[in-house]
Amino acid sequence: SFNLLGKCVNQGRETCNLNSSVCFTGRAYFPVLPDFVGFNVQGCRDNSSDCGSVTSSSLLGVTYNTNITCCSSDNCNPVTQSGAPSTKMTFTAAVGVAV
């Protein structure tokens, strides 16, 4: 599933194949916007090699972090949603504020 600005875009149950025993949640967020929920992507992985990692990148000169968490039991990474007003800004507005 994919979570954009605190809203689940295509929430659905995913059945991992036999070679994918690891569920993951990848969250991208801007450190300069602590109240901004960010973006989540969830699904299945073949291994846990990147689990627990945090990487930093840059978009239009603004630093963002990506955090990958993993688990291996059924429904272990549910979609979390936030209705806070700060999560309702658009991606363009978030980048504009960060710059």
Image (tube, rainbow, N blue to C red):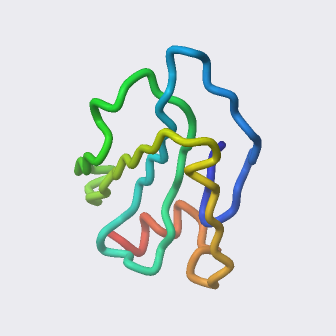
Q: In this view, does 2 lie above or below 96?
A: above
Percent of width and height locating residue 15: 69, 28
Seen at 52% across and 69% down, the residue is 93
| 90 relative position to 34: left or right | right
Seen at 56% across and 50% down, the residue is 76
Seen at 49% across and 62% down, the residue is 38
Report the quarter where the N terminus lies.
Answer: top right
- The residue most toward the bottom is 85
Percent of width and height locating residue 52: 29, 48
Percent of width and height locating residue 57: 25, 48
Q: Is residue 47 above or below residue 98?
A: above
Q: Quadrant of residue 34?
A: bottom left
In front here: 38 or 69? 69
In front here: 15 or 6? 15
In front here: 84 or 81? 81
Report the quarter where the C terminus lies.
Answer: bottom left
Percent of width and height locating residue 39: 52, 55
| 97 relative position to 57: left or right | right
Seen at 61% across and 18% down, the residue is 17
